[in-house]
Amino acid sequence: MTAAALCLDPADNVATALRPLTPGDVIAIAGVAAPMLPVEPIPAFHKIALKNLPEGALVHKHGAPIGRLTGAVRAGGLVHVHNLKSLKACGSASEQRREGRDR
């Protein structure tokens, strides 16, 4: 099975779709052992949640925190501007780590 999404760091809780993903399709994710089922359409190059994520959770991509969820997202759900507040709006990721706000 060719990878349909990519996860670069084991600490990431999202992967990047390499093509449009359709609900119910069993997909392989490069960097993740288990296959996954998208629960909603995921456009190419958008983020898919690798596990259930509660409101307020930090989203990690490429080994770094990129934002905080404004609502819960199920495993296989779309993570995008409608449910993610960028950390850039409240300081850089390195500032977040220094101040301990990344966990």
Image (cartoon, helix red, strand yellow):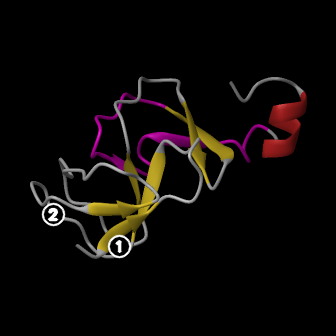
Position of residue 67 measured from the top left corner of the image (x, y, whole percent):
61, 41
In terms of image quadrants, where is residue 28?
Answer: bottom left
For the point 86% across and 43% down, the residue is: 94
> What residue is pinned by disc 1?
44
Position of residue 59 measured from the top left corner of the image (x, y, whole percent):
55, 40
For the point 36% across and 36% down, the residue is: 51
Whole-angstrom CA distance, mark 1 to mark 2, is 11 Å
Answer left or right for 12 relative to 72. Answer: right
Between 74 and 91, which is closer to the camera in this rendering?
74
Say if the magenta span includes residue 44: no
Q: Residue lying at the far left in this picture: please name it.
A: 24
Say if the magenta span includes residue 74: yes
Crowding near the residue tagged with mark 2, few <14, some 14–19, many ≥20 C-alpha atoms within 10 Å: some
Q: Amino acid at mark 1?
A: Ala
> What residue is pinned by disc 2?
22
For the point 18% across and 47% down, the residue is: 39
Q: Amino acid at mark 2?
A: Thr
Position of residue 73 measured from the top left corner of the image (x, y, whole percent):
34, 34
Tell me if residue 25 comes above or below residue 49 in the rendering: below
Look at the numbered disc 1 and give the secondary structure of its residue.
loop
* Residue 73 numbered mark, or none: none
For the point 41% across and 46% down, the residue is: 82
Query: Along the polypeptide, which appears first: circle 1 or circle 2?
Result: 2
Crowding near the residue tagged with mark 1, few <14, some 14–19, many ≥20 C-alpha atoms within 10 Å: some
Answer left or right for 64 relative to 18. Answer: right
**Quarter containing the C terminus:** top right
> What range of the chain is rendered magenta?
70-90
